[in-house]
Amino acid sequence: MTPPTPIIGVIGLGTMGLGIAQVYAAAGFPVIATDAHAPARDSARDRMDQALAARVSAGKLTEAARAATLSQLTIAGTLAEFAPCDLVIEAIVEERAAKQDLFRQLETILRPDGILATNTSSIPVRDIAAGLAHPARVLALHFFNPPSAMKLVELAPHDESLTQHINTARQITEKTGKTVIQCPDRPGFIVNRCARPFYGEALALLAEGRTPSDIDAAMLAAGYRLGPLSLVDLIGADINLAATRGMYAAMGNHPRYHVFPALEAQVAAGHLGRKSGQGFLHPAQPGPAPADAAEIALRIESTLINEAHWLLAEGGTTPDGIDTAMRLGLNFPRGPFEALALHGRPAVLQTLARLHAAAPQPLKARYTPAPGLA
C-alpha cells in the first residue's frame, strides 16, 4: 500500500514563503499556507499564479503543470487548519520571539511526529527550539531566494533534533529537486558564514587602495560570475552590512568578520547598489583585469579556504558539503576545498602568512590558519 503524500505547511506569504510554497506544490505535495496579514493571504494565490504564468510564457512550464501546482495550494485562515501537516515551515519575521511563539502554538495543533522547520538564516535553531514542549521536532530548512530557482537548501538540526525528523525533512525536500546539504547549527550555517571573506577581503583590498574595478575584474578572470563588490551592489550594501554586523556579533567580534568602514560609508551615503542607482561599481562594469589579478584572486580564495576550515573544525559538515553549498548558494565556480586543491596548501599558507605579517595588529587574527589547514 502506497503511503499518503506528506502535507506541507508554510507560514508567512512574503516573497520567500510564497516561493517555498510553490516549490513543494510544484512537486505534487499538498500545501496549506497562511500569513498573519490578511492582504498577504488574499493575494497569495494570484501572486503564485502570476509567477507560474511567467514561466509558462517563457516556455519553462506547461499550462497543465501550472494548473496542477495551483491546485495543490490551500490558503488557511487559522493555524488550526495546519493539524494534518507532516512538515510546517515558517518564513515569518526574523525575530526569535515571534518564531518561538508561532512554534508554541503549532506544537499544540500538530500531531507528535509533525516537524517544525524554520527558514531562519541567522538565529540559532537551538534558541528557537528552547522552551518548547517538544524541541526534538525542530530544525532549519534554509531556502535561498528565489526558492523556485535556487537549488540549495541548508538543513540545520540542533543537538536535540531527532534523526527521524532530519531524515524525513531531507527526503521530502529532495523530492522537490533541491540539493539538501546538512550543516551545523552555527551562525550563518554554511553559505552566509563562508561567504564573509569574499566580501571582507575585497573591502580590505579597497582599504589598501585597490579599485573596485581591479578587485572584481580579478575575480571574473578567476571564473567567478560576479566580483565581490558587484555582488554587494546586487544584494544591497545595507543588507550586506546588516549580515556582516550580525556575524561579527555572533562570532564574538572576531576580526575575521570585521566590519570595514568602507561598507559603513556606502550605507551612510545611501550608495546601496542597484536599488539606489549607485554602488561600489554600479552602474559601471569592471574594466580589464589588472596585471596581478591572479594574486588578488589567490588572496580572496585563501581567506575563503581558511574560513571553510574553521567551520569544518567545528563539526557538523563535510568538505564536499561546504563546496556544494558554496557553488549552489552563490554560483561560485568552485568551493573552498576545490580552490585549495587548485592552488595547493603551500601557496595558501604562504598567502595567509604574508597577510598576517602585513595586517595591523587588531586584524592579524583574520589570517590565522584554521585547524586542519595549518
Image: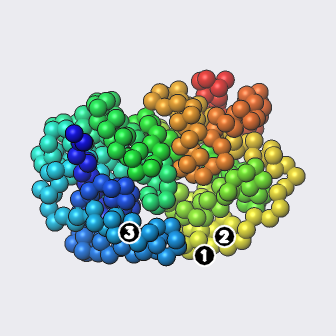
Q: Earlier in the sequence, mark 3 or mark 1?
A: 3
The label shown at residue 282 is 2
Residue 249 horizontal/vertical position (percent) = 46, 44
Count all numbered tags in the image, as a single digit. 3
Query: Which amino acid is tagged 1?
Result: Gly
Residue 332 horizontal/vertical position (percent) = 63, 49
Q: Earlier in the sequence, mark 2 or mark 3?
A: 3
The image quadrant that residue 125 belongs to is: top left
Q: Which residue is mark 3?
A: 64
Query: Which amino acid is tagged 3?
Result: Ala
Nearer the observer: mark 2 or 3; the answer is: 3
Classed neighbour count for the residue bearing mark 2: other residues with Cα under 10 Å, few (<14), some (14–19), many (≥20): many
Residue pictured at 57% horizontal, 51% vertical = 330
Query: Which amino acid is tagged 2?
Result: His
The label shown at residue 81 is none
Camera-side residue: 209 or 79? Answer: 79
Classed neighbour count for the residue bearing mark 3: other residues with Cα under 10 Å, few (<14), some (14–19), many (≥20): few
Residue contact at pointers 1 and 2, CB within 8 angstroms: yes
Residue pictured at 51% horizontal, 62% vertical = 238
Q: Which residue is mark 1?
A: 277
- The residues bearing labels 2 and 3 have C-alpha atoms spaced at a distance of 41 Å
Residue 229 horizontal/vertical position (percent) = 65, 59
